[in-house]
Amino acid sequence: MPVSAPPTNIFNVVQRGMSAQMVRMNAAASNLANAGSVAGSEEEAYRPLRAVFAEDSDRRTGLSSVSVQSVTRADVAPVKRHEPGHPLADANGDIWASPVSETAEMVEMMESARQYQNLVEAMQTAKQLMLDTMRMK
């Protein structure tokens, strides 16, 4: 993913944070959608996605924000199950299930939604402070 310029104001910081949380939430949704998937080999089995964040800071303004550095596959082994009657079973009768923890993904989604809401509130507060300042005479 491209390296972005450092943040220049509070609204830019909030926008970057909201975008990063949306990538995080989309990865968790993809993981949940593939939680019950199976494959005929270990290599083909679905592995969970994880968003990797990086800090973007500007020493001139003192602002620091986040960007999505990459979205990677988690390094976890799929679950091997012996089901000889399954249509995807290999020569040994094994299938490979995705190693997605539905509970962990739901926690990831809730945390991402909470962080997103915190950013919305920070933006609303900054907006209100700006409006209050403009009304002063």
Image: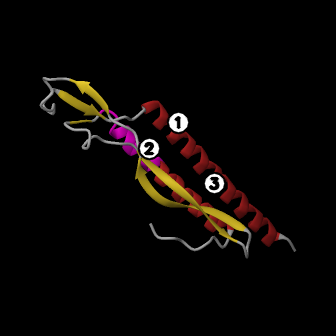
Compared across the picture, whether 136 is left or right of 45 comes to right
Residue 38 coordinates in the image, percent (x, y): 25, 34
Gap between marks 1 and 2 measured at Cα: 9 Å
Gap between marks 3 and 2 measured at Cα: 19 Å
User: Mark 1 sits on what residue?
Assistant: 107
Residue 28 covered by magenta stretch: yes
* Classed neighbour count for the residue bearing mark 3: other residues with Cα under 10 Å, few (<14), some (14–19), many (≥20): many
The three-letter code of the residue at mark 1 reads Val
Q: Is residue 17 above or below residue 135?
A: above
User: Mark 2 sits on what residue?
Assistant: 28
| Count of residue discs | 3
Q: Quadrant of the C terminus?
A: bottom right
N-terminal-most mark, 1 or 2: 2
User: Mark 3 sits on what residue?
Assistant: 119
The three-letter code of the residue at mark 3 reads Leu
What span is colored magenta in the figure? 25-36
Residue at the spot 24% in from the left edge and 43% down from the top edge? 44
Q: SS for tag 3?
A: helix
The three-letter code of the residue at mark 2 reads Ala
